[in-house]
């Protein structure tokens, strides 16, 4: 199943937050993002220069167009644009039945610019009445509960919103002080909490949008609420670590760096092969172009590949048969890669050849004797003409 996620939110011209962050997140998680744009902003990593709300009738027309044709498995609401749009969306969501709704009550951009006026914030109550979960940051949580931020007890505020509106509330600790952060999911009859160390980066633009869209996607997959939040938190943390370092202010996150395969089901993203000479094997895989990320000589090393998969070498006397493993690394330009590696001194068992199974490949052996196949397959790796399902 491809989850169909309707995102009702504003556009960020800098690509860090809003609709742009939502689409990147949903796509990386294997979903299909549909959009109803509520506002167009002129912004970058430093600040917001202008905001133009989209007329309510156009927002509703976007929603109707995708719902009538494609259908919706979950809804994510971000920047809403105006109080009229907030009320109209809330009224339309009366018809959503059991579709999960994630409401991220956007009030202020990461740069500090206001993205909702008092009348729009007042209309948020109607959206929370429809929502499955609301995901405010700490200042937004205090404002929604009618408390002063400096005097606010986040748990008390969340419980008030749960009681008043019937939606769950995620308390996000990103705006809190200290190196250790706590997030807490408050439901009517349950509380789940997570702890994690703060990731030291200024490139946090779009964290709230990414979190809410990820939760919506996992709910659409059928995860229960705590599981959806748990997986969304992990995705956000990986995207923060993979931020591309763009702009002069709060840069965008790296949703695209997380790698595919974050939906449901098993994912192959790590392979370990045996070795008996740490330095020789380490140097061989470095020479292939793998980036070493863990070093524990003389027994273990881990490398990172394009796309986020990892590969490791391990010295273990229990598994000492050389050549018992074949490892496959795909290259977009196989012949050029082989030429580069030959000039670097690596020896291949044969030249690149086209195989009957529609792969072009070449083979060599690592210092332990494991077979390493470099290949190019394109769509034929997953979608050969004889694919059975």
Image (cartoon, helix red, strand yellow):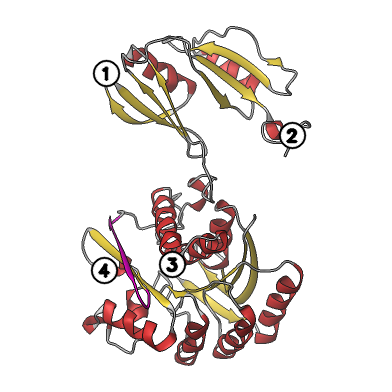
Structural crowding at the residue carrying mark 3, measured as other residues with C-alpha within 10 Å and reported as few (<14), some (14–19) or many (≥20): many
Report whether residue 197 is seen. Answer: no
The residue to which callout 3 is attached is 208
Quadrant of the rendering where the N terminus is positioned: bottom right
* Extent of the magenta region: 187-198
Quadrant of the rendering where the C terminus is positioned: top right
The residue to which callout 4 is attached is 176
Q: CA distance from mark 2 to mark 3?
A: 40 Å
Question: Does 211 appear above or below 281?
Answer: below
Mark toward the viewer: 2 or 1: 2
Residue at the image point whose x is 70% and y is 76% from the top: 62
Q: Which mark is residue 387?
A: 2
Q: Secondary structure at mark 4?
A: loop
Q: Single out the residue that lies furthest toward the right.
A: 385
- Mark found first going from the N terminus, 2 or 1: 1
Q: CA distance from mark 1 to mark 4?
A: 42 Å
Q: Is residue 120 magenta?
A: no
The residue to which callout 1 is attached is 298
- Mark found first going from the N terminus, 2 or 3: 3
- Mark found first going from the N terminus, 4 or 3: 4
The front one of 197 and 287 is 197
């Amino acid at each position: 199943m491809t989850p169909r996620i309707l995102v009702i939110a504003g556009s960020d011209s800098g690509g860090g937050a809003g609709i742009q962050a939502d689409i990147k997140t949903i796509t990386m998680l294997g979903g299909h993002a549909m959009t109803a744009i509520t506002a167009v902003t002129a912004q970058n990593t430093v600040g917001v220069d202008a905001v133009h709300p989209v007329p309510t009738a156009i927002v509703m027309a976007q929603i109707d167009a995708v719902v009538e044709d494609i259908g919706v498995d979950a809804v994510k609401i971000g920047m809403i644009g105006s109080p009229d749009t907030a009320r109209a969306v809330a009224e339309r969501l009366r018809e959503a039945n059991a579709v999960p709704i994630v409401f991220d009550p956007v009030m202020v951009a990461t740069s500090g610019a206001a993205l909702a006026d008092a009348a729009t914030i007042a209309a948020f109550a109607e959206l929370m009445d429809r929502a499955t979960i609301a995901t405010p940051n700490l200042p937004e949580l205090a404002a929604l509960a009618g408390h002063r931020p400096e005097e606010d007890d986040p748990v008390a505020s969340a419980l008030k919103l749960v009681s008043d509106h019937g939606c769950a509330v995620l308390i996000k600790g990103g705006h809190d002080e200290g190196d250790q952060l706590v997030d807490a999911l408050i439901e009517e009859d349950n509380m789940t909490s997570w702890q994690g160390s703060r990731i030291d980066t200024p490139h946090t633009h779009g964290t709230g949008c990414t979190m809410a869209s990820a939760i919506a996607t996992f709910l659409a997959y059928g995860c229960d609420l705590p599981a959806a939040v748990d997986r969304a938190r992990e995705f956000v943390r990986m995207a923060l670590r993979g931020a591309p370092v763009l702009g002069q202010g709060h840069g965008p996150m790296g949703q695209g760096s997380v790698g595919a395969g974050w939906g449901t089901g098993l994912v192959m993203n790590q392979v370990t092969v045996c070795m008996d000479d740490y330095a020789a094997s380490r140097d061989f895989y470095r020479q292939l172009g793998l980036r070493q990320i863990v070093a524990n000589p003389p027994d273990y090393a881990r490398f990172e590949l394009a796309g986020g998969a990892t590969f490791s070498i391990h010295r273990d006397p229990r598994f000492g048969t050389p050549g018992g493993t074949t490892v496959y690394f795909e290259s977009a330009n196989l012949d050029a890669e082989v030429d580069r590696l030959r000039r670097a001194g690596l020896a291949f068992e044969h030249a690149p050849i086209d195989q009957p199974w529609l792969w072009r490949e070449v083979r060599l052996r690592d210092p332990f004797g494991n077979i390493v196949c470099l290949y190019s397959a394109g769509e034929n790796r997953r979608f050969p003409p004889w694919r059975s399902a």
